[in-house]
Image (cartoon, rainbow, N blue to C red):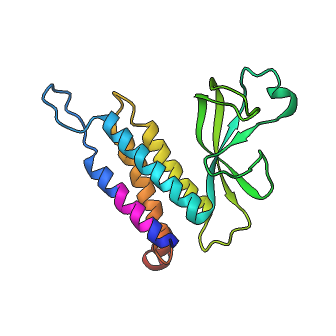
Amino acid sequence: MKINQFYANLRSQLKKVITGVQDADGLFWDDTTPNSSIKRELESLLKENLELVAKHFGIYVVTRHCSCPNKQHNKYFDFPTSNNYGLDINYGDSRYKWTMQQFFQGERYCACACSKINKPTNHWVIDDFVYDKQLERDFDADKLINILTDIVEAIDSAGERRPRSAIREWLLRAVLNINDELLPIAMDDFVTRYITN
Protein backbone atom coordinates (compact mmCIF):
# COMPACT_ATOMS: atom_id res chain seq x y z
CA MET A 1 0.00 0.00 0.00
CA LYS A 2 1.26 3.47 -0.88
CA ILE A 3 1.04 6.26 1.66
CA ASN A 4 -1.25 8.43 -0.50
CA GLN A 5 -3.70 5.55 -0.86
CA PHE A 6 -3.64 5.07 2.91
CA TYR A 7 -4.22 8.79 3.54
CA ALA A 8 -7.06 8.96 0.98
CA ASN A 9 -8.82 5.96 2.56
CA LEU A 10 -8.37 7.30 6.10
CA ARG A 11 -9.61 10.74 5.02
CA SER A 12 -12.75 9.18 3.53
CA GLN A 13 -13.39 7.15 6.71
CA LEU A 14 -12.97 10.21 8.94
CA LYS A 15 -15.26 12.39 6.80
CA LYS A 16 -17.95 9.72 7.06
CA VAL A 17 -17.66 9.69 10.87
CA ILE A 18 -17.66 13.52 11.08
CA THR A 19 -20.93 13.77 9.15
CA GLY A 20 -22.57 11.37 11.62
CA VAL A 21 -21.52 13.33 14.72
CA GLN A 22 -24.48 15.61 15.48
CA ASP A 23 -25.14 17.57 18.64
CA ALA A 24 -27.82 16.07 20.89
CA ASP A 25 -30.89 18.14 21.70
CA GLY A 26 -31.20 16.67 25.19
CA LEU A 27 -34.79 15.63 24.53
CA PHE A 28 -36.12 12.15 25.19
CA TRP A 29 -36.93 11.67 21.49
CA ASP A 30 -33.41 12.68 20.46
CA ASP A 31 -32.34 10.21 17.78
CA THR A 32 -28.75 11.35 17.23
CA THR A 33 -25.98 8.77 17.44
CA PRO A 34 -24.86 8.40 21.09
CA ASN A 35 -21.25 9.04 22.07
CA SER A 36 -20.78 5.37 22.95
CA SER A 37 -21.57 4.35 19.34
CA ILE A 38 -19.29 7.04 17.94
CA LYS A 39 -16.53 5.89 20.28
CA ARG A 40 -16.90 2.23 19.19
CA GLU A 41 -16.83 3.26 15.53
CA LEU A 42 -13.67 5.33 16.04
CA GLU A 43 -11.99 2.56 18.06
CA SER A 44 -12.69 0.09 15.25
CA LEU A 45 -11.42 2.56 12.63
CA LEU A 46 -8.26 3.21 14.64
CA LYS A 47 -7.57 -0.49 15.24
CA GLU A 48 -7.90 -1.24 11.53
CA ASN A 49 -5.59 1.63 10.58
CA LEU A 50 -3.00 0.81 13.25
CA GLU A 51 -2.75 -2.68 11.73
CA LEU A 52 -2.20 -1.12 8.29
CA VAL A 53 0.52 1.31 9.43
CA ALA A 54 2.33 -1.53 11.21
CA LYS A 55 2.14 -3.84 8.20
CA HIS A 56 2.96 -1.31 5.47
CA PHE A 57 4.89 1.51 7.13
CA GLY A 58 6.76 0.08 10.15
CA ILE A 59 4.90 2.20 12.72
CA TYR A 60 4.01 0.30 15.90
CA VAL A 61 2.32 0.69 19.26
CA VAL A 62 4.59 -0.74 21.98
CA THR A 63 3.31 -1.22 25.53
CA ARG A 64 5.59 -0.32 28.45
CA HIS A 65 4.63 -2.08 31.67
CA CYS A 66 5.48 0.37 34.45
CA SER A 67 4.53 -1.71 37.46
CA CYS A 68 2.96 -5.01 38.38
CA PRO A 69 2.59 -7.17 41.52
CA ASN A 70 5.56 -9.39 40.55
CA LYS A 71 8.32 -8.69 43.12
CA GLN A 72 11.00 -9.22 40.45
CA HIS A 73 9.54 -6.54 38.15
CA ASN A 74 11.72 -3.61 39.20
CA LYS A 75 14.75 -5.78 39.92
CA TYR A 76 15.59 -6.59 36.30
CA PHE A 77 13.76 -4.15 34.06
CA ASP A 78 13.36 -0.44 33.48
CA PHE A 79 10.18 -1.03 31.51
CA PRO A 80 9.41 -4.49 30.14
CA THR A 81 7.60 -4.15 26.82
CA SER A 82 5.08 -6.05 24.76
CA ASN A 83 3.43 -5.58 21.37
CA ASN A 84 0.94 -7.30 19.10
CA TYR A 85 3.33 -7.75 16.18
CA GLY A 86 5.60 -10.53 17.45
CA LEU A 87 8.57 -8.14 17.41
CA ASP A 88 11.29 -7.93 20.04
CA ILE A 89 11.29 -4.20 20.83
CA ASN A 90 12.85 -3.32 24.18
CA TYR A 91 12.27 0.07 25.76
CA GLY A 92 14.68 2.57 24.23
CA ASP A 93 15.70 0.14 21.44
CA SER A 94 17.93 2.26 19.18
CA ARG A 95 16.57 0.61 16.01
CA TYR A 96 13.32 2.48 16.63
CA LYS A 97 12.43 6.11 17.09
CA TRP A 98 10.50 6.56 20.33
CA THR A 99 8.25 9.47 19.41
CA MET A 100 7.03 10.36 22.92
CA GLN A 101 3.52 10.28 21.43
CA GLN A 102 1.39 8.09 23.65
CA PHE A 103 -1.57 6.08 22.47
CA PHE A 104 -2.65 5.33 26.05
CA GLN A 105 -1.45 5.78 29.62
CA GLY A 106 -3.26 4.30 32.59
CA GLU A 107 -4.27 1.12 34.35
CA ARG A 108 -5.00 -1.94 32.23
CA TYR A 109 -5.85 -5.53 33.05
CA CYS A 110 -3.19 -7.56 31.23
CA ALA A 111 -0.18 -9.81 31.82
CA CYS A 112 3.02 -7.89 32.48
CA ALA A 113 5.91 -8.68 30.15
CA CYS A 114 8.43 -8.99 33.01
CA SER A 115 7.76 -12.75 33.22
CA LYS A 116 6.22 -15.34 30.90
CA ILE A 117 4.39 -16.91 33.85
CA ASN A 118 2.64 -13.71 34.95
CA LYS A 119 -1.12 -13.83 35.13
CA PRO A 120 -3.17 -10.79 34.07
CA THR A 121 -3.38 -8.07 36.73
CA ASN A 122 -4.38 -4.42 36.87
CA HIS A 123 -1.20 -2.41 36.49
CA TRP A 124 0.02 0.84 34.93
CA VAL A 125 0.97 0.76 31.25
CA ILE A 126 2.00 3.26 28.59
CA ASP A 127 1.38 2.59 24.90
CA ASP A 128 4.02 4.40 22.84
CA PHE A 129 4.13 5.05 19.11
CA VAL A 130 7.49 3.94 17.70
CA TYR A 131 8.78 3.43 14.19
CA ASP A 132 11.56 1.50 12.52
CA LYS A 133 14.40 3.92 11.68
CA GLN A 134 15.87 1.60 9.02
CA LEU A 135 12.76 1.47 6.87
CA GLU A 136 12.88 3.89 3.95
CA ARG A 137 9.80 6.08 3.71
CA ASP A 138 8.71 8.73 1.24
CA PHE A 139 6.68 10.50 3.93
CA ASP A 140 7.13 11.97 7.40
CA ALA A 141 6.29 9.22 9.93
CA ASP A 142 5.91 11.77 12.74
CA LYS A 143 3.15 13.55 10.80
CA LEU A 144 1.30 10.25 10.32
CA ILE A 145 1.60 9.55 14.05
CA ASN A 146 0.22 13.03 14.81
CA ILE A 147 -2.82 12.24 12.64
CA LEU A 148 -3.35 8.94 14.48
CA THR A 149 -2.99 10.79 17.78
CA ASP A 150 -5.79 13.17 16.70
CA ILE A 151 -8.04 10.12 16.29
CA VAL A 152 -7.04 8.93 19.78
CA GLU A 153 -7.98 12.38 21.14
CA ALA A 154 -11.36 12.17 19.37
CA ILE A 155 -11.97 8.79 21.03
CA ASP A 156 -11.04 10.27 24.42
CA SER A 157 -13.51 13.12 23.74
CA ALA A 158 -16.35 10.66 23.07
CA GLY A 159 -17.16 9.97 26.71
CA GLU A 160 -20.78 9.97 27.82
CA ARG A 161 -22.34 13.39 28.35
CA ARG A 162 -19.37 15.11 26.71
CA PRO A 163 -19.86 17.68 23.95
CA ARG A 164 -19.67 16.21 20.47
CA SER A 165 -18.05 19.35 19.12
CA ALA A 166 -14.72 18.14 20.58
CA ILE A 167 -15.00 14.87 18.63
CA ARG A 168 -15.63 16.79 15.40
CA GLU A 169 -12.77 19.21 16.09
CA TRP A 170 -10.19 16.43 16.56
CA LEU A 171 -11.40 14.58 13.48
CA LEU A 172 -11.43 17.77 11.42
CA ARG A 173 -7.87 18.48 12.52
CA ALA A 174 -6.88 14.98 11.37
CA VAL A 175 -8.55 15.55 7.98
CA LEU A 176 -6.83 18.93 7.55
CA ASN A 177 -3.46 17.36 8.34
CA ILE A 178 -4.18 14.54 5.87
CA ASN A 179 -5.01 17.19 3.25
CA ASP A 180 -1.58 18.75 3.82
CA GLU A 181 0.07 15.36 3.33
CA LEU A 182 -1.87 14.62 0.12
CA LEU A 183 -1.33 18.01 -1.52
CA PRO A 184 1.94 18.80 -3.33
CA ILE A 185 2.60 21.53 -0.73
CA ALA A 186 1.02 22.21 2.65
CA MET A 187 -1.99 24.55 2.56
CA ASP A 188 -0.24 27.13 4.78
CA ASP A 189 2.70 27.18 2.35
CA PHE A 190 0.29 27.54 -0.59
CA VAL A 191 -1.46 30.49 1.06
CA THR A 192 1.86 32.15 1.85
CA ARG A 193 3.23 31.60 -1.64
CA TYR A 194 0.21 32.36 -3.81
CA ILE A 195 -2.31 34.36 -1.81
CA THR A 196 -0.40 36.71 0.49
CA ASN A 197 2.37 37.54 -2.00
- Chief secondary structure of the magenta span? helix
Q: From where the camera sits, is residue 147 visible?
A: no
Q: Is residue 123 above or below residue 85?
A: above
Seen as rendered, the residue at the extreme right is: 75
Residue at 72 percent across and 31 percent down: it is 66
In this picture, which residue range is highlighted in magenta?
Answer: 7-14
Residue at 74 percent across and 67 percent down: it is 134
Q: Position of residue 18 (x, y in %)?
A: 31, 51
Q: Is residue 75 left or right of residue 97?
A: right
Residue at 42 percent across and 76 percent down: it is 195
Q: Is residue 193 above or below residue 85?
A: below
Q: Position of residue 92 (x, y in %)?
A: 79, 48
Q: Is residue 37 above or below residue 186?
A: above
Q: From where the camera sits, is residue 45 visible?
A: yes
Q: Is residue 123 left or right of residue 79?
A: left
Q: Position of residue 176 (x, y in %)?
A: 43, 61
Seen as rendered, the residue at the extreme left is: 29
Residue at 50 percent across and 68 percent down: it is 181
Q: Is residue 140 above or below residue 116?
A: below
User: Which of 158/187 is in front?
Assistant: 158
User: Which of 117/42 is in front?
Assistant: 117
Q: Is residue 71 magenta?
A: no
